[in-house]
Image (cartoon, rainbow, N blue to C red):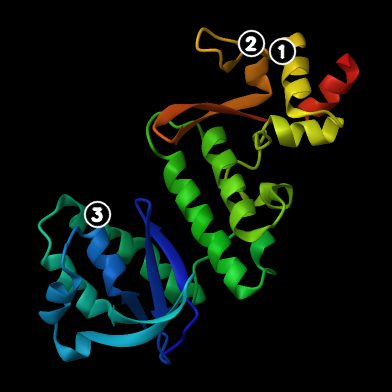
Amino acid sequence: MNTQLIPFAFEGLPIRVTTDAQGDPWFVAADVCAALHLPDTHKAVARLDDDEKGRNSIPTPGGEQDMTIVNEPGLYSLVLGSRKPEAKRFKRWVTHEVLPAIRKTGSYAVPGALAALPAPTHDRVSAILLIGEAVAKVPGVKPGIAAAATLTCIQENTGISTEVLRRALPSANAPVCALNATQLGKLLNRSAKATNQLLASSGFQFRNDRDEWELTKAGEAWAEAMPYSRNGHSGYQILWNPAVAEQLKEVA
């Protein structure tokens, strides 16, 4: 059994898949049960025939872990064991996206700009991109916000510059907003406070009634207000397109 995982994501949930010597896919049972809303993985897998399940060492952030895996027939048996509406969507997703991708290429196809990455980093970036694509489809979420969140997540998890990956994202033709005031300030040799003041004096943002920075109409062309929740407080963090730095240098 291969130990290298093929990362997929079903409606925002990670689904880890590996292949055996014949190239047949085996799915991490816990991931499948989570997607199907089957609360007891052990109980669900116990109902499967012996040739529908197995064990394999699966790489995780905490190291290799021995996990239960199921093959394609076992996966369909689990699908039949769920009465949730997600089960039908999950089966269609597997048969129309996952299996064709594996059988065609042996892996999940990711943007060409990522092909040269080391395998562990490749897998992490691929998984984050898949989640970012799912977030972008959530009603009310702007593609620019999803792209900025994805870029930030990639940089925090891999240390890779988000600018290097910008062209690999689905929103490649749209301006990418990924810099907070501190990061933007580094491009201008200013503190975050001075950068915010410069953005305000340039007409790109203002202090609202909650004493928070809010974008003006002019500012919306250069930034995205990204929602966040921290320590019980919800609000928006403004992320700027790096190109705004040139505009600010002219004003300064």
Q: CA distance from mark 2 to mark 1?
A: 6 Å
Residue flagged by tag 3: what amino acid is it?
Answer: Arg
- The image quadrant where one finds the C terminus is top right
Residue flagged by tag 1: what amino acid is it?
Answer: Ala
Q: Is label 3 or label 2 in front?
A: 2
Q: Position of residue 175 (x, y in %)?
A: 67, 33
Q: Earlier in the sequence, mark 3 or mark 2?
A: 3
Label 2 sits on residue? 206
Given the current orientation, which residue lies at the most extreme front position? 231
Q: Secondary structure at mark 2?
A: strand
The crowding category of the residue bearing disc 3, from other C-alpha atoms within 10 Å (few below 14, some 14 to 19, many at least 20), is few
Q: Position of residue 223 (x, y in %)?
A: 64, 25
Label 3 sits on residue? 89
Residue 25 is left or right of residue 184, and the answer is left
Residue 169 is left or right of residue 192, and the answer is left
Residues at circles 3 and 2 in contact by the CB criterion of under 8 Å: no
Residue 15 vs 202, above or below: the answer is below
User: Which of 75/251 is in front?
Assistant: 251
**Among the 4 quarters of the image, the one containing residue 137:** top left
User: Which of 70/226 is in front?
Assistant: 226
Residue 32 vs 230, above or below: the answer is below
Residue 124 vs 142, above or below: the answer is below
Q: Secondary structure at mark 3?
A: helix
Label 1 sits on residue? 200
Given the current orientation, which residue lies at the most extreme top position? 209
